[in-house]
Amino acid sequence: MPDSVALDSVDLEILRLLQNDARTTYRDLAAAVGVAPSTCLDRVSRLRRGGVILGHALRMDPAKVGRPLEALLSVQVRPHRRELIGPFVERVRALPESRALFHLTGPDDYLVHVAVAGTADLQRLVLDEFTSRREVARVETRLIFQQWTCGPLLPPVPQA
Amino acid sequence: MPDSVALDSVDLEILRLLQNDARTTYRDLAAAVGVAPSTCLDRVSRLRRGGVILGHALRMDPAKVGRPLEALLSVQVRPHRRELIGPFVERVRALPESRALFHLTGPDDYLVHVAVAGTADLQRLVLDEFTSRREVARVETRLIFQQWTCGPLLPPVPQA
DNA sequence: TGTGAAAATTTCAAATG
DNA sequence: CATTTGAAATTTTCACA
């Protein structure tokens, strides 16, 4: 599978519309883009097969399911070797509190985005699932006041 | 709209399945959960109206659209006053490179998740869109080696 | 890529327990 | 009164032009 995929203006417009609402019908896509619905189906199938579209995700409000507090945990794993970080990553991913996990450059190796019931739940999570582990050298906790999604992801404009 | 919503086992199972694949049909949901398809439609409509389901998002691979490098930017905005941070947030959200934006506790006020074409593009972004701004006091850049999504978001288990 | 028809799904009103 | 039934409306899907 090639690293990047050739996308024409029809593909780009379809991606833009689907990022706005992933449930847009082929009929509506077709009307907006100016091609036949079956062409939209073909384009979307191609984008899926090409790996441009990875899937469809449900956007949920964590607060509405009893997790009104979100936080980012910066975690140092020491020693930072493969035999330790593999299990660490899988354990973190399996936590019901985890929303996303990043492996980063810099002094803090991992960033974990979590959603919890409150500060007590957050304290329990940090103490029981992170700092109590031998491979976890340090955890820094920052609360999320607010978060925003951003505009559609599109190819960079070629610099002149 | 209430802060949280009463969810029975049917709702929870539907949410779990839809988080796994948001395109699961009502027919398949119904078969898996053990109710009629129309009941699934009713439950999902309710979850949408109740704000539990915020929408359906397309998961895309940034690398496939010419943005193979991702990074997190920690940004200090000084002075941290409403009349400065409102425009800052809107400008950042409108950048084609921005994927997500967080307002955090701690010394770094904002975290910006960006996807760029390469290190040159990242340098341009940091210099032209962040450090050149008067209200931006400091930017710290960390590259993302790898990222993972996590298991389904479900209500916390009541502590005994 | 479009046409048009078949298959599947979504949606809803009425019936059911 | 939430759920199911059953049918209509819509969408998805595909063979062929």
Image (tube, coloured by chain):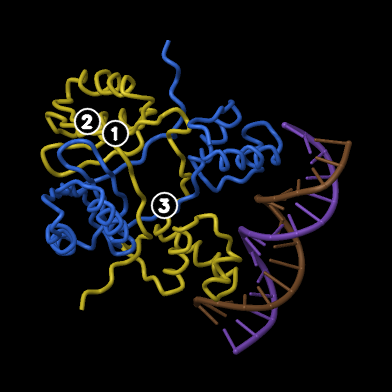
Chain colours: A blue, B yellow, C purple, D brown
Tags 2 and 1 touching, CB below 8 Å: yes
x and y, in percent, of residue C6 in the image = 82, 56
Mark 1 Cα shell of 10 Å, populated few (<14), some (14-19), many (≥20): many
The span from disc 3 to disc 1 (Cα, nearest Å) is 22 Å
The span from disc 2 to disc 1 (Cα, nearest Å) is 7 Å
Residues indicated by labels 2 and 1 sit on the same polypeptide chain:
yes
From the viewer's perspective, tell me whether residue A51 is left or right of residue A36: left
Q: What amino acid is labelled 3 in the image?
A: Arg
Camera-near label (3 vs 2) is 2
x and y, in percent, of residue B67 in the image = 41, 29
Chain letter of mark 1 equals B
Quarter of the image for residue A122 reads bottom left
Residue, disc 2: B141
SS category of the residue bearing label 3: strand
> Which residue is drawn at the image coordinates 27% and 21% (left, top)?
B123
SS category of the residue bearing label 1: strand
